[in-house]
Image (spheres, rainbow, N blue to C red):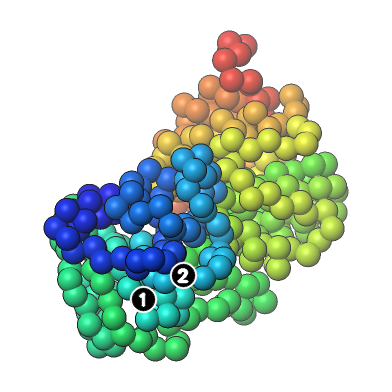
Amino acid sequence: MLTDRLSFARDAGALVLPDPGRLCVFGARGDDDLSPLGADLQVVQGMKPEHDALAARGVDVAVAPSGEFAGALVVLPRARDLARDLVARAVALARGGPVWIDGQKTDGVDAMIRSLRAHGTVDPVISKAHGKLFRFEGRVPDDWRAGETVLPSGFVTRPGVFSADAPDRGSELLAELLPEGLKGTVADLGAGWGYLAARILERPGVTALHLVEADHAALECARANVRDPRAVFHWADATRARLPDPVDHVVMNPPFHTGRKADPALGRAFIAAAAGLLKPAGQLWLVANRHLPYESVLSERFAKSADLSNDPAFKVIHAERPRRAGRPRA
Ligand SMILES: C[S@@+](CC[C@H](N)C(=O)[O-])C[C@H]1O[C@@H](n2cnc3c(N)ncnc32)[C@H](O)[C@@H]1O
């Protein structure tokens, strides 16, 4: 992890930092120990739970860099186009100062090193804890900067957001199975760039739709894609989100990964959160890969649930009569 490689590099005397000067750190996570980088830094982190964890530790954290910087460090994300964009932004921001890049092998750090060697020097390289931390000096091609993608449907997405190249098939299936007569107030937990939200708002009986999304970049896309006045946008961790009032429906395609790791606990936390956001007569509509183990949390948090889909890959669950946390089963 970044923490191991940073402390190793510092102890080996390899971590040359701008002195004096502020460092911009793209993508550090809530539990990363950044002390080897000194105190004069700003972390750019758009995922709300990580952002809040950093802020709670007193780290200066923002969704976009602000001010001047004398160096930069990029923690590579999984998505290659986003990784290249961040490296290009870091090189531009550092204005000739040191640029460090860190990544796990599983996030493509070796491929990034190979690409960067064609554009400058990569030295030193610290290999530790299934990843690499290295310094890059050089220029990267202009086309590494990534902008928005406009899909054939007219929706805009950005590199790294969920399902950036096309609507997710699970979300399409859920949208097809949602009743045309859906009415009242609705929440979409993990709303992404807004595909499912746009389909929910095709139902004229919907009076308000709360789009709750942790990824700031995805929510910015949703704001561009969903221009309906019934839409209300929340940059929030859905597992802790509060809405102004309980809602009639939660419609969602919950996340099932944290980074590269499959994490059914996150989907289960979304289901528990949905139960807490619904009115007593509220209903949950959710799509999930068929293998995901959500049955126990559904029966703990809802009195009734049924699978509406015959699809071999996805289940579409309709659940009714939410139970509050800790309330004994009826
Ligand atoms: C499977 S995608 C569904 C996206 C969108 N609803 C769609 O249909 O295309 C799940 C979304 O949940 C978001 N997410 C992950 N963790 C979250 C959290 N703790 N709170 C809110 N959203 C989260 C992800 O960024 C992603 O956009």
The residue sitting at 64% across, 50% down in the picture is 235
Q: Name the residue nearer the viewer: 48 or 257.
A: 48
Which quadrant, please, contains the C terminus?
top right
How far across and down, in percent of the image, does residue 240 sit? 59, 35
How far across and down, in percent of the image, does residue 141 sit? 39, 88
Query: 71 above or below 189?
Result: below
| Residue on which the image places disc 1 | 97
Tell me the kind of residue under disc 2: Phe
With 303 as the anchor, is 295 left or right in this view? Answer: left
Query: 21 above or below 53?
Result: below
With 249 as the anchor, is 51 left or right in this view? Answer: left
Tell me the kind of residue under disc 1: Gly
With 138 as the anchor, is 91 left or right in this view? Answer: right
How far across and down, in percent of the image, does residue 199 sit? 71, 59
| Residue on which the image places disc 2 | 69
Q: Name the residue nearer the viewer: 323 or 214.
A: 214
Badge 1 marks a residue whose secondary structure is loop
The residue sitting at 59% across, 20% down in the picture is 325
Query: Pointer 1: residues within 10 angstroms few (<14), some, or many (20+)?
Result: many
Q: Do the residues labelled 1 and 2 touch (CB within 8 Å)?
A: yes
Q: Name the residue nearer the viewer: 209 or 218.
A: 218
Say whether mark 2 is within 8 Å of ligand 1: no
**What distance separates the C-alpha of mark 1 from that of mark 2?**
9 Å
The earlier-in-sequence mark between 1 and 2 is: 2
Q: Is residue 308 visible?
A: no
Query: 284 above or below 301?
Result: below
The residue sitting at 78% across, 33% down in the picture is 245
